[in-house]
Image (cartoon, rainbow, N blue to C red):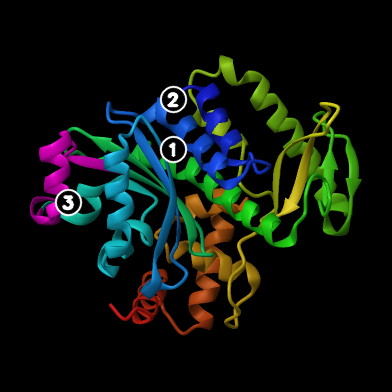
């Protein structure tokens, strides 16, 4: 994956000034050229905040026949919780055969219908999810069953983190009705000069971090076409800075470009833990590794491990695994299915 392709996906994720259908269409069109296996690609938003009332839509697609997309839309409300959990709530990237197993693939009527009608035997799922339980799933139909490599999963899990972050930011702006630069905690020139800062963003360490991030992003964008691998750009461009801010482009009417820093950390319910512990635990319950959580929150992996250990101890669990299993059990208990 080239640097320019990586930047295109990330820029599509943070195109928050677009209406939701246009934004979703932009995301799938940025992803499709990189992963399309001959059957197009599709994307859909979802709400898994209530396990017994899972909702999916709207949909967008690239080179997917209308009949096939209609079938996907019709099937979404009928998904059992066991499928929702294994495809939306525990993994960020994998194929259906990896996530659901060969028996499901061999016996499910819709899987068989897709293979017999369109020659689609499997599908890659790239799941942009976070602890809010709202997300965006990207589907890439495949002509043969296969598993994705660890390298592919790691790369696309990081890119999915940007889609999740962009979607979360869009929802927050929709609720607050903020537009343009209103409500931003910091506004920076592409060279890192700070045009505006307030609250925590005005403090010395935060100002330095924001300046450094703005300069790094501008360099990554300028070098994107010359970077052979997109992994370098992915590493530089993180969903959150200091576990608080998303930094994204904003263009004024005169064409002047700024980087805007808005608070965009995922909101999680109170449960006796610190905010950071709740966020880390929330991501971990979705199957995210410490390394991925560190990337998503702009922390060090060692810091993530410390927060998980502290949370497990406070809640009376001996290990991370015990904590996550209990959270998933509690989540499943909320469904009537």
**3D distance between C-alphas at marks 3 and 2:** 32 Å
| For residue 209, side relative to residue 231 (left or right) | right
The answer to which of marks 3 and 2 sits earlier in the sequence is 2
The answer to which of marks 1 and 2 sits earlier in the sequence is 2
The answer to which of marks 1 and 3 sits earlier in the sequence is 3
Q: Secondary structure at mark 2?
A: loop
**3D distance between C-alphas at marks 1 and 2:** 9 Å
Q: Which residue is mark 3?
A: 110
Q: Nearer the viewer, residue 311 or 188?
A: 188
Tell me, yes or no, whether the two marked residues, 1 and 2, touch with CB atoms within 8 Å.
Answer: yes
Q: Is residue 74 above or below residue 337?
A: above
**3D distance between C-alphas at marks 1 and 3:** 29 Å
In percent of width and height, residue 190 lies at 80, 30
The residue located at (45%, 33%) in the rendering is 31
Q: Quadrant of the N terminus?
A: top left
| For residue 16, side relative to residue 129 (left or right) | right
In percent of width and height, residue 8 lies at 55, 29
The disc placed on residue 1 is 2
Q: Which residues are magenta?
A: 103-124
Q: Nearer the viewer, residue 209 or 329?
A: 329
Magenta-drawn stretch contains 264: no
In percent of width and height, residue 248 lies at 70, 40
Tell me, yes or no, whether the two marked residues, 1 and 3, touch with CB atoms within 8 Å.
Answer: no
Q: Which residue is mark 1?
A: 155
The residue located at (32%, 58%) in the rendering is 76
Magenta-drawn stretch contains 115: yes
Q: Secondary structure at mark 3?
A: helix
């Amino acid at each position: 994956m080239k640097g320019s392709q990586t930047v295109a996906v990330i820029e599509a994720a943070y195109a928050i000034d677009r209406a939701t259908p246009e934004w979703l269409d932009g995301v799938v069109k940025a992803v499709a050229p990189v992963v399309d296996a001959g059957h197009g690609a599709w994307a859909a938003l979802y709400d898994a905040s209530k396990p017994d009332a899972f909702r999916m839509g709207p949909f967008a697609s690239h080179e997917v026949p209308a009949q096939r997309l209609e079938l996907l839309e019709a099937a979404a409300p009928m998904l059992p919780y066991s499928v929702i959990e294994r495809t939306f709530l525990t993994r960020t990237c994998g194929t259906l055969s990896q996530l659901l197993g060969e028996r499901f693939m061999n016996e499910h009527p819709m899987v068989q219908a897709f293979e017999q009608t369109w020659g689609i035997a499997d599908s890659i799922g790239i799941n942009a999810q976070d602890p809010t339980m709202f997300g965006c799933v990207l589907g890439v139909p495949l002509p043969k069953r296969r598993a994705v490599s660890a390298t592919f999963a790691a790369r696309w899990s990081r890119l999915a983190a940007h889609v999740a972050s962009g979607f979360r930011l869009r929802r927050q702006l929709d609720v607050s009705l903020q537009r343009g630069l209103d409500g931003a905690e910091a506004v920076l020139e592409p060279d890192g000069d700070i045009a505006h800062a307030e609250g925590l963003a005005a403090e010395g360490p935060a100002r330095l971090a924001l300046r450094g991030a703005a300069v790094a992003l501008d360099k990554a964008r300028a070098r994107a076409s010359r970077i052979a691998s997109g992994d370098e750009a992915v590493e530089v461009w993180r969903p959150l800075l200091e576990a608080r801010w998303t930094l994204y482009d904003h263009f004024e009417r005169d064409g002047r470009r700024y980087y805007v820093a808005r608070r965009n950390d995922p909101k999680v319910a109170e449960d006796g833990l610190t905010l950071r512990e709740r966020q880390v635990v929330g991501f971990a319950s979705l199957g995210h590794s410490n390394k991925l959580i560190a990337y998503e929150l702009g922390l060090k992996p060692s810091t993530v491990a410390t927060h998980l250990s502290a949370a497990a101890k406070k809640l009376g669990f001996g290990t991370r695994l015990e904590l996550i299993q209990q959270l998933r059990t509690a989540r499943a208990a909320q469904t009537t299915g």
